[in-house]
Amino acid sequence: MADKDSIEPPSFTGPKLLEDVQKICIAIGAPFSEPTIRAVTAAFPQNFREGAIVLRATSREGDALNFRFYERRPVLLLRIAEDSGLLESANLLARLLDEWSKPWAGDGSELEVPRQSCDFDPAKGLVKAWAYMGAPRPLYNLFGRSDVPESITKHRDAFYQLGLISVRHVAVDFHPNTVNIYFGIQGPMTAPRAAELTALAGYHFDLAIESADQFGWLPEVHFPFAVTIEVATGKIKRVAWYALGLSMDRRPALGGRLETFLKVAPDYDVDAFLGVAWSFGPGQERYLKVEKSYGGGVVPLMKGWKSPGVV
């Protein structure tokens, strides 16, 4: 029987990705650099050819368009990035992600082997790297590594109290020097639950201002929730909840920039993927993020990963 991530994806070349990324950036007013995009695709030709490719944009004017590949194999991608000059050697966040990417003992008898992925900014190059844990990973297991900074682990008790105990992905963001932890949490979402979760980032959630409609897009049983922590200070910079498995015909209204993104961004997959995230931060900062498939079989990969809402 074939491995659940081994579905043969269609192939995408660097020139086609370059053409499409530039077109989207122009349409939504995002910065880009042709030499940067070429350097990225030259560094990871096999990964773009065999991986599942996702595009991401936000509702904030001037924000970057991001493109990423989800890797189907356990590969130490950050070592490739270092060898290609896309990342400085001995980067502390890179080493932390490599540590979290080591095989770990799950609930069963077999070791889980995380899979790394990379996120790119068309103007800056490699900006973020991910690790899918292979199975929901207990927070105590993730935080049990000796080299995890105390600025991150000090939030352990607060996370436990909120039921944030099971981790699906982790990511490191190199430019703001942050760590992202993606939990799977139980629904349904309610206003009191939203208030206690957003309070982690110093956001005051008030239904007199917010729309409860967003709750209707979240799965009632299980959905992703992300926490972003600044490594130097330990400050929680933002939180977000995600509605995955949406479609162009079944999604919330998104507004001008994101509607333009969805209109101009091509999708070469047979089964399209669409996800929306509501992000909250200090000073009542709030914005939307949208992720959509570009190609390479995103939906089959996410089904294999049992991503909430992707059916």
Image (spheres, helix red, strand yellow):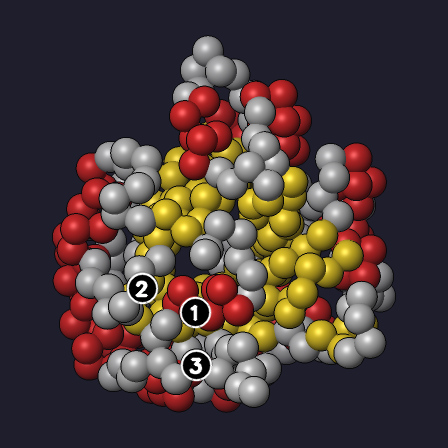
Instruction: Measuring from the top left, give residue 293's x and y in whole percent.
Output: 33, 62
Report the side of 235 relative to 295 (left or right). Answer: right
Where's residue 191, x and y in %? 57, 21
The label on residue 7 is 3
Assign a secondary structure to mark 2.
loop
Tell me which amino acid carries mark 1. Pro
Q: Are marks 1 and 2 in contact (CB under 8 Å)?
A: yes
Relative to residue 89, is residue 123 depicted above or below? above
Query: First in sequence: mark 3 or mark 2?
Result: 3
Alpha carbon separation for disc pair 1 and 3 = 8 Å
Image coords of residue 292 (percent x, y): 33, 57
In-image side of 56 versus 78 (left or right): left
Question: Which one is earlier in the sequence, the residue at label 1 or at label 2?
Answer: 2
Could you say which disc has been placed on residue 300 in the image? 1
Label 2 sits on residue: 271
User: Nearest the camera: 153 or 235?
Assistant: 153
At x 45% / y 31%, what residue is drawn?
Answer: 216
**Residue found 21% across the figure and 43% down from its top:** 259
What is the three-letter code of the residue carrying label 2?
Asp
**What separation in Å lies between label 3 and label 2 (alpha carbons)?**
13 Å
Q: Do the CB atoms of the residues marked 1 and 3 lie less than 8 Å apart?
A: yes
- Where's the N terminus, which quadrant? bottom right
Question: Mark 3 falls on what kind of element?
Answer: loop
Q: Is residue 185 left or right of residue 140?
A: left
The answer for how far apart the CA atoms under marks 1 and 2 are is 8 Å
Query: Above or below — where is 64 with respect to 110?
Result: above
Residue 192 x %, y %: 62, 21
Whether residue 202 is visible, yes or no, is no
